[in-house]
């Protein structure tokens, strides 16, 4: 990437802190979280694949989410660990592009899968007697495949647009990975069209699918006459609703605000939550799967 006589061949990741002691502490913390993420999600995928009692639509989607979380943690965490203990904070231009492409693709895919899970819960509540017929394995595979395809198509569009900028301002990224906002901050040229594209992708691919799904779920629950029936119906999707709220809330907090209100120190913390911490929360599904097996 070249502008005039200035060529960007690598970026410098500032990370969280320059204090050597704190860097060592963060290395230990991130290493523990990485091991828990890999162990938990690998165990869950193994349980779902090897036990026929877990071959249900809900666990099919949970298994795919665990695979995404496992993949996503491998995109971010190894580089974070190296940055914490090494004096070399650089990442190559190609490495930055690859990290951005895969992280965006996995994030979009997870958004689509969460929407598919919301539809699964909607069918379970609105058509309990026809649930097994409607949510066939063929439909589940189609929804999962469409989620991956749509996610990486969006990622291709966003990556191409982002790395078509000239990075003429600097090559120092005030973050621990190659994220969208720090990269746009380094770019020069007109960015209004880019922000419009980002808002379009957020509204059409992140907000609309999940919002529509849960509006249908809420409307269906409200049509149930008895309070006990409403509570039972709500309990079938309450844990998923919590996951959706935490995941979507952190993404929307970072990417839907006006660019004048960006604060990179705060955004680093929120980014850590949905890139590193959130995949660990999937470990509760391991406990639920084990409980179901022993029960």
Image (cartoon, rainbow, N blue to C red):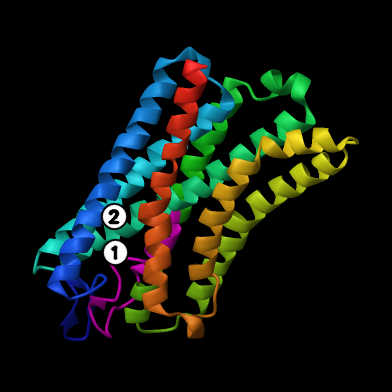
Task: Locate residue 193, reporting x and y percent.
Answer: 51, 76
Q: Residue at x 45, y 31 (%)?
A: 287
Residue 228 numbered mark, or none: none
Task: Give, as a single range, the part of the protein colored magenta.
Answer: 155-179
Q: Quadrant of residue 139?
A: top right
In the rendered view of the protein, which quadrant contains the N terminus? bottom left
Question: Is residue 221 shown left or right of residue 62?
Answer: right
Q: Quadrant of residue 182?
A: bottom left
Predominant SS along the magenta part = loop
Give the camera-side residue of 50 and 285. 285
Residue beneath disc 2: 76
Look at the numbered discs 2 and 1 and tell me whether their residues touch, using CB distance below 8 Å: yes
Give the camera-side residue of 74 and 266. 266
User: For the residue labelled by badge 2, is the local secondary structure a helix, a strand or a loop?
Assistant: helix
Is residue 16 visible to the viewer in this orientation of the structure?
Answer: yes
Q: Residue at x 40, y 46 (%)?
A: 279
Above-or-below relation of 237 to 276: above
Q: Residue furthest left?
A: 87
Residue 177 numbered mark, or none: 1
Task: Locate residue 177, reporting x and y percent.
Answer: 29, 64
Above-or-below relation of 32 to 224: below
User: For the residue labelled by badge 1, is the local secondary structure a helix, a strand or a loop?
Assistant: loop
Question: Is residue 295 shown left or right of residue 136?
Answer: left
């Amino acid at each position: 990437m070249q502008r005039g006589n200035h060529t960007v061949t690598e970026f410098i990741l500032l990370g969280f802190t320059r204090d050597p002691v704190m860097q060592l502490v963060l290395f230990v913390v991130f290493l523990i979280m990485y091991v828990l993420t890999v162990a938990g999600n690998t165990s869950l995928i193994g349980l779902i694949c090897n036990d026929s009692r877990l071959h249900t639509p809900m666990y099919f989607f949970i298994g795919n989410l665990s695979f995404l979380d496992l993949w996503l943690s491998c995109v971010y965490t190894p580089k974070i660990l190296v940055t914490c203990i090494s004096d070399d904070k650089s990442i190559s231009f190609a490495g930055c592009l690859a990290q951005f492409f895969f992280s965006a693709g996995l994030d979009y895919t997870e958004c689509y899968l969460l929407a598919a899970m919301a539809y699964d819960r909607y069918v379970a509540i609105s058509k309990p007697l026809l649930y097994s017929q409607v949510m066939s394995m063929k439909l589940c595979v189609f929804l999962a495949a469409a989620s991956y395809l749509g996610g990486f198509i969006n990622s291709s569009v966003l990556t191409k647009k982002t790395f078509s900028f000239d990075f003429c301002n600097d090559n120092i990224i005030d973050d621990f990975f190659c994220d969208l906002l720090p990269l746009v901050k380094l770019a020069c040229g007109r960015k209004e069209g880019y922000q419009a594209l980002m808002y379009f992708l957020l509204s059409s691919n992140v907000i609309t699918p999940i919002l529509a799904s849960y509006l249908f779920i809420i409307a269906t629950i409200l049509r149930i006459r008895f309070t006990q029936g409403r509570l039972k119906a709500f309990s079938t999707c309450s844990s998923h609703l919590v996951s959706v709220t935490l995941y979507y809330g952190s993404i929307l907090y970072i990417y839907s605000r006006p660019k004048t209100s960006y604060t990179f120190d705060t955004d680093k913390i929120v980014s850590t939550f949905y890139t590193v911490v959130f995949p660990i929360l999937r470990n509760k599904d391991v406990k639920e799967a084990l409980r179901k097996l022993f029960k």
